[in-house]
Image: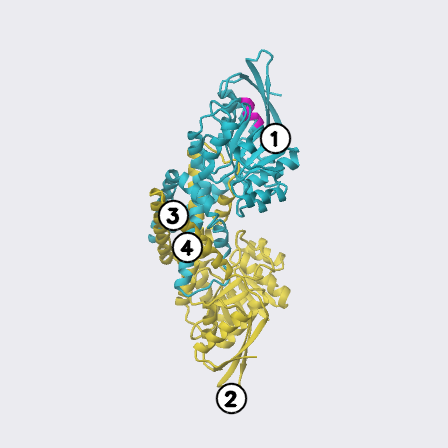
Chain colours: A yellow, B cyan
Amino acid sequence: MKIAVLGVGLIGGSIGLAARERLGAHVRGFDPAPAALAESIERGAVNEACASVADATAGADVVFVATPVGAVTDTLGAALRVAGGDCVVTDVGSTKRGVVASIDDHRFIGGHPLAGAESAGVRHARADLFDGATWFLTPTQSTPGVAYERLHRLLVDLGARPAALDPDTHDRVMACVSHLPHVLANVLVAQASGVLDAHGERLPHAGPSLRDATRVAGANTEMWRDVYLSNADVLVEAIDECIDRLGSVRDSLVARDAGAVAAWNDAAREERRRLLESDLEGGAVHELRVSVPNRPGVVADVALALGRAGVNIVDMALHPAPDGRSGWIGLWVAGSDPAREAEQLVGELGLPVTRA
Amino acid sequence: MKIAVLGVGLIGGSIGLAARERLGAHVRGFDPAPAALAESIERGAVNEACASVADATAGADVVFVATPVGAVTDTLGAALRVAGGDCVVTDVGSTKRGVVASIDDHRFIGGHPLAGAESAGVRHARADLFDGATWFLTPTQSTPGVAYERLHRLLVDLGARPAALDPDTHDRVMACVSHLPHVLANVLVAQASGVLDAHGERLPHAGPSLRDATRVAGANTEMWRDVYLSNADVLVEAIDECIDRLGSVRDSLVARDAGAVAAWNDAAREERRRLLESDLEGGAVHELRVSVPNRPGVVADVALALGRAGVNIVDMALHPAPDGRSGWIGLWVAGSDPAREAEQLVGELGLPVTRA
């Protein structure tokens, strides 16, 4: 397999390392920063350092655009101009509405791996960075099933758990589970700093809660400025909601309302349990066979329905029927409850489904 | 040494375990919950289970009140009624203004260990819970030097790093580095939960930032309700400040002001570096000798001046002069910069100081 990586930072470099190590892929890399490109060769993250997006992209089966969010659309455009007709082009940007709206090409499928980025740069790249990590994909009605299948399988081979989600939901969910936590970390660290300065204090040991709550404070500015701005509208709504919620806690405290404070705290414990429980998975892997018409978008429909419900597709395979007008998808899902849920969700799409 | 532990939960139980294991102390425990008391015997956290506060306290050299904040003042009162004249009575509550204002007794020194409490109960108690943990103490002008020294040394022997702080500063600092982070964790988890519900989503894997930012969400309600309410006035101010700061980020985002967003993020990185740097310590231990008049409060003055500056007193020893009207304090401080700073701070108190 020939892979192009455009932008060889932490994520691009890790894609290169994993693809070479686990798939024996041939990886061509490009980066506007010569030093990063040289380091990616040194680290073995790419086989060849290329002088341009076009050079790296020529002949690739899959192209990963792994630049900061602000440069994604331009780089995608440049790659799509030279990519072959069967090439799959994807990106790894943290927000998805902007890029999906601006690229109208069936070869493009938006992507976003939820993989740590505390330390930026190819020097921190690792072949196992994506092991077990959710990797969101935003297929659309024009996405060919074979393209989605190829990308899905490649990501599984890189160690990730691909999950389909529409761009709007993706950006709203990320605003709340990632962007707002980053904003709060920044705000908290600034406030703590101010309080300690005002009291002429140095904290003997920052408490463990402050340390945890501010771990992501001041994350890479080049990356995060773009993330914040590209999701500004939704993030502003999330901040407003957070301000409202803080105001309501404030009111309970002003009223010294012990019952309200206790109920609010109990609810948080329950909500956290519920949120983290959805991380649990397990059980044997079940195979579902879904009969599908041969039309673009049907694989996206299935993937989106399961992604939305948090059902993890461990693996998938397309089987076109000899008549070329229909076929079936094999889906592997871990755990009997998720498998049952997947069966029902696929059934609700009007697609015949059986357990293998 | 005879120690009484009143309230055998995570903290009280860990004090008992550490005192027995590291000091060979004899520990008498009391708890209003018979099951907790029985478990503390079973776990070896206390030598004797007592039927009342008075029973446990009789004959003790040091008494630790380790109940939830709401019960601290009453328990302290009961202990002080039976404690001997030379006994040191302390507590471990997370807020200090209320209790220090309500107890007027030179035998009482307020305390607060910054030790993890994710899992409550004596079954999670460990002898090493306090290793390296800051343990705030709030001595006052009426605190006898020998009482402070005895408690300081005992806490060092339990593995902790005692640091003196006045109650008002303590509560303001804790509002910001502990109570507000807990409030934000609760708010964030509720908001994420709401967003995911609204989209019919289950998060395939909660992002790492959400997981970190909400680790303390819904912490033990019995404990935290009391903490929030006992520090309500200062916490409300902290929440108001946080709301203001969020509003200002919001305005930068609405204006799509890339420069302001980048500057704000850069500042947070710098502030976090500065906050966490103060955690670093090291270097050889230096001994300072401080000549002091024999008056109550002088040891508290020294400890508070150093505590306020974040200078860690590794150990201390009082040496009364034969005339009984003066003496000197030996202070051990790690690192040559902190030692120099300590020397200067003590000098500013008008006390002669030399390096040993």
* CB contact under 8 Å: marks 2 and 1: no
The residue under label 4 is which amino acid type?
Ala
Label 1: which residue?
B2
Whole-angstrom CA distance, mark 1 to mark 3, is: 39 Å
Whole-angstrom CA distance, mark 4 to mark 1, is: 46 Å
Along the viewing direction, whichever of A347 and A70 lies nearer the viewer: A347
Q: What range is drawn magenta here?
A: B145-150
Whole-angstrom CA distance, mark 4 to mark 3, is: 18 Å
- Tell me if residue B146 is in the magenta stretch: yes
For disc 2, the neighbor class at 10 Å (few under 14, some 14 to 19, many from 20) is few
Whole-angstrom CA distance, mark 2 to mark 3, is: 67 Å
Marks 1/3 same chain: no
Residue B173, picture quadrant: top left
Marks 2/4 same chain: no
Label 4: which residue?
B190
Q: Main secondary structure of the magenta part?
A: helix
Q: Chain of mark 3?
A: A
The residue under label 1 is which amino acid type?
Lys
Label 3: which residue?
A259
- Nearer to us of marks 2 and 4 is 4
Q: Chain of mark 4?
A: B
Q: Chain of mark 1?
A: B
Secondary structure of residue under mark 2: loop
Label 2: which residue?
A323
Along the viewing direction, whichever of B65 and B149 lies nearer the viewer: B65
